[in-house]
């Protein structure tokens, strides 16, 4: 169901109104690996690696905050204007 909705939203020629994150369950062995994979896809990997996070939830919250602040920088994905939040389907 989600895959069909994502394909439909991406098929319009314009950049979709969300940031897509793909995780491969067989390649994500730990929470830290998942966190780094998500951060790399959102273009904030270096900033996430600089700060130690006590758990996955804190790391994800920090990462999404960084992505919100730096939208469009360090990533090839087109995003909304600077500082605009966008949905992130996994």
Image (tube, rainbow, N blue to C red):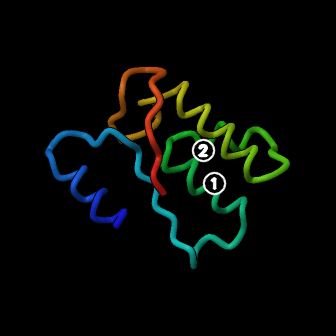
Vertical placement of residue 60 versus 21, above or below:
above
Tell me, for residue 36, which label it has, or none: 1
Expressed as whole percent of the image width and height from the top left, the position of residue 13 reads 14, 44
Could you say which disc has been placed on residue 73 in the image? none
Residue 77 on image: x %, y %: 35, 41
Q: Which residue is rendered at x = 55% and y = 24% of the image? A: 69
Q: Hey, which residue is sitting farthest bottom in the picture?
A: 26
Residue, far front: 1
Mark 1 is surrounded, within 10 Å at the Cα level, by few (under 14), some (14 to 19) or many (20 or more) other residues, namely: many
Labels 2 & 1 near each other (Cβ < 8 A): yes
- Which residue sits at x=57%, y=79%? 26
- State how far apart marks 2 and 1 are (Cα): 6 Å
Residue at image point 50% right, 41% down: 43
Element type at mark 1: helix
What residue did someone put label 2 on? 45
What element does badge 2 sit on?
helix
Image coordinates for residue 37, horizontal then vertical, percent = 57, 57
Vertically, is 90 above or below 75? Answer: below
Left or right relative to 5: residue 49? right
């Amino acid at each position: 169901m989600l895959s069909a909705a994502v394909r439909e939203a991406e098929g319009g020629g314009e950049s979709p109104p969300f940031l897509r994150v793909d995780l491969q369950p067989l390649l994500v062995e730990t929470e830290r690996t998942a966190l780094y994979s998500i951060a790399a896809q959102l273009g904030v990997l270096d900033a996430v690696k600089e700060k130690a996070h006590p758990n996955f939830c804190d790391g994800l919250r920090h990462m999404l905050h960084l992505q919100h602040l730096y939208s469009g920088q360090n990533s090839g994905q087109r995003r909304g204007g600077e500082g605009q939040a966008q949905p992130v389907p996994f």
